[in-house]
Image (cartoon, helix red, strand yellow):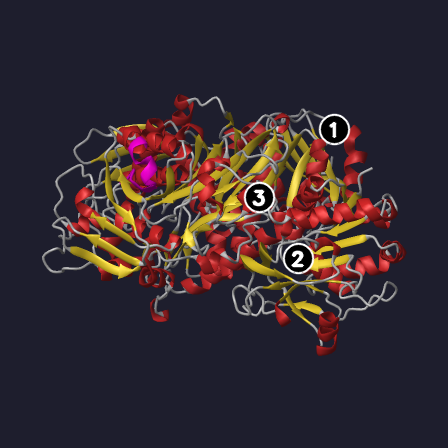
Amino acid sequence: MPRFNSLKMVKEIEILTADDAELMRISREGTLSLSLNEMQTIQTHFGTLGRNPTDVEIETIAQTWSEHCVHKTFKSTILYSEEGKAPEQIEGLFPTFIQRATEEIAKPWCVSVFSDNAGIIEFDEQFNLVFKVETHNHPSAIEPYGGAGTGIGGVIRDSLGTGLGAKPILNTDVFCFGMPDTPYAQLPKGTLHPKRVFKGVVAGVRDYGNRMGIPTANGAILFDARYTANPLVFCGNVGLIPRNRCEKSVEPGDLVVAIGGQTGRDGIHGATFSSAELDDTSESLGSVVQIGNPIMEKKIVDALLQARDQNLYRSITDCGAGGFSSAVGEMGEEIGAEVHLERVSLKYEGLAPWEIWLSEAQERMVIAVPPENLDELMEICAAEVVEATVLGTFTDTHRLQVFYEGTIVADLEMEFLHHGLPMPVKEAVWEPPKHPDMASRDGETENYTHDLKQLLASPNIASKESVIRQYDHGVQGGMVINPLVGVENDGPSDACVTTPVLGSRKGVIVANGINPRYSDVDPYLSAAAAIDEALRNVVAVGGTLEKTALLDNFCWGNPDKPDRLGELVRAARACYDIATAYGTPFISGKDSLYNEYRDTTTGEQRAIPSTLLISAICVMPDIQNAVTMDVKTPGNFIYVVGNTYAELGGSHYFNIHGFVGNTAPAIRPSEGKLTMERLSAAINSGWVRSCHDCSEGGIGVAAAEMAFAGGYGMSLRLDAVPTGEHIDADDFLLFSESNSRFLVEIEPQHQHTYENHMAGIPFGCLGTVSDTPEFVIKGKTGRSIIETSIHTLKSAWQDF
Amino acid sequence: MEPKALILRTAGTNCDAETDMAFQLAGAETALVHIQHLISDKVNLADYQILAIPGGFSYGDDIAAGILLAVEMKHKLTDALHRFVEEGKLIIGICNGFQVLVRTGLLPGNGASEMRQRATLAMNTSAKFECRWVDLETQESPCVFTKGVKTRVYLPVAHAEGRFTAPAKVLSELEANNQVVFRYAENRYPNNPNGSDSDIAGICDATGKIFGLMPHPERFLTKWNHPRWTRNPTNTQKIGSEEGDGLVIFKNAVHYAESNLL
């Protein structure tokens, strides 16, 4: 068989004779993002083979071993130390804190966790649900529209590549940007202005999701100056899959078939690029960002779901990071595969074999097709006008063999490719930070109306309606709780609810929780609060903990730095503690590390706040029991449920006064669990007319949002707020962000039933819904501390 | 025998499943058919009494919304389409489907034989995609789809190119022939979400058998689709009809087809 050196388009990479410096030069200049230890391992491996690797081979290894694909940080051994505690050795954050939580919770309705492209849970007799959230941060920093669009495109393909393929039914998107009012002069070199990033990202997600015909009905947008150089773009997708299509397998002899778009140079090195820090020259790396075509992806969905229902293929995965190299490499991991690159349908001529093999051109899927089914598959693809190409065959050689025009250009053992990666041992330290604390302003002010308005108008809390209305949230016809609710359809819903099977009243709730500000105090509390918030949002619309699953998405700075990694350890530990306490398993997750920016001239280094997004999905037996957050009827009672503590560290109230503080909301999961379970039961019994969780801005903001969304005022008293510790300060009662709290609206006729039902849970009746627009809150001593109208509050909230 | 409704699909169609559900609930036998199957004669349009062109982004709305599918229908389904119209069968185009019907010239229509575009659906005056529920006023018209529909209907829109506009002559003809079927109930943004001339949300041809509208009646098939259903005081008692206000449009079509086209 002719070897690669007969081909001009394939290069031999001279590593056998290379010293350490040369090995690192090869890694750096090739955007391989391989460490010295990894380069040495490759050198040793090829040393025993007595030859150098080809460019195709070393690129394949770099992709497969990248942080993006293999999640080294979450699997490696960590030596963790914390002030005043014995050092600890953690054998992998993922197995120790995430996977173990799910195993111990052992929900029978978890169908597939962590093994496929998305997690799978049971839905009804006929269908299961798949759910995955991904990030597309680095591409969105450089090219917001393309980066975000292909972010959503990529996560949709994750659903389509799960089991034998799920129909995408819902998108969720969470973005973190720099402050929209950042002066241009303060922009880090080579970065785009946050407003430009914001606009481009929203447009990218809008155009991709709307064209695919998938409702985008849940999300959040956060702002913090530290996201300026490293914006975060989380894209999630829920899919619906028949119960008997959730398993995949590959047999030797099955054909490797590529379906969808053509292959070009776009997106080469995406996986390795995202496994490194950005710097002020990253914007010139145009080719690492992919180009999206949502109509192509829609055609693939249309064709593949027909082929799935006719059982024409045995396995499927998407071409994401690493392109064909990852897709075929993963599918053939247990048996082997042979691929002929000249068969790949190209956008244009001139691609070197390694470029074809690694291209992250979008809208491509790979399926394993038994040869006898090929004709039928081709017929479906022809009818849907989708290109399908047989690239090769799955084999029993346990090797990944890549050919170009009859010449072998890569010949790798699957064992080395998938298990040869040396796992690093990393160091992590955690030292609690100290911030200046802020005292209550009760002495200096009589009235908190201005503070409340300022909170409502702050970018993190203010209405996101102008964005939400650009997303089609009604397509597919199943939406029953919209992202915007209330008398004028403009109040902020806690979660969305949809009925993916038309004609059925069984619903799916999707919600999220994210609190990067608390990371400044303690990433453990930030992670715990994110879980609590996601669950509160589920419960607030009528869901139950019992039927809720979680996803974790960590966006962090450089994990090679011990302090950043220490924060990651804290957050991961919270995931285990809180998920097990609430009994809500993780079914999938993802991490995006190296979210740092380096100015190559000044050497200045910036990291994002440690950010954990928790996404929650809950199956709701009957959507008739759903409630929304807008108040419904004057005369109804407003209750607060759950204890308030003086916990304002990382709160929005401290933030508007320029403080971080040191007491972030603690998590009391046994209290929280009982509160949520009891409240779920009350809602599902029909005793609750509206419900809203207390999160950013505490009771004050939650009450204001409920009132103006419903179009009625409120008259409330803070002396009825149940507290877990003695609090006199009105501002602390009003704006503390303690976990596991809700405001609920109860009709007088249900008051006694409701109170009896909630016995044992801290609650207090704060007052009533008014039939006027007046919004009044009296402080602990009985004086008015808020006196305004819902119109004033609403316009502050909408003036963003 | 049940009337048969063909739900037309092509690359980028995305409201086909709910449109299909609407016709099923209305009592039709339905088929989701890719336009390639009509072009290749694998499926015969003549076997159906109702043609529905659902919402979506046919061919990505490249060039302009609906134009490529309109050209394809005019040139590759010429005879079948002419016969369908001449036999007085029903056609409904929703959102992207309305854009297609306007670009084929089937709406506002000028008799069955001539297909010439006389109006357009332009970019919204807000210059962006608008997803919101709007109040519609039902007009006196020959439209068979809206017989007995309430004078005021609440339906969602979701489009970027929905501003109906036409030369003054065409507009006055539409008014004179009562071809305006739905108007946005208030002459201002956002209830008129796109800035349409004369607040036009939907029109029919002179016979009332071809109907196009920007709002999505297929997204309001049950009461739980209404954006404020949780505010309904009867909600807690779990009483009242479960049917959404959009369904009647599909039922009218099926009833008409049952009585006149079978």
Quadrant location of the C terminus of chain A in the rendered image: bottom left
Marks 3 and 1, Cα distance to the nearest angstrom?
Answer: 25 Å
Chain hosting mark 3: A
Snapshot quadrant of residue A241: top right
Lower sequence index among marks 3 and 1? 3
For the residue marked with disc 1, what is the amino acid?
Pro
Q: Is residue B24 magenta?
A: no
Q: Residues within 10 Å of mark 3 (few under 14, many from 20)?
A: many
Whole-number angstrom distance, CA of label 1 to CA of label 2: 41 Å
Q: Using the image, determine if residue A656 lies above or below residue A56.
A: below
Mark 3 highlights which residue? A156
* Residue at numbered disc 2: B95
Q: Secondary structure at mark 2?
A: loop
- Span highlighted in magenta in the image: A739-753
Indicate the secondary structure of the residue bearing disc 3. helix
Q: Which residue is mark 1?
A: A370
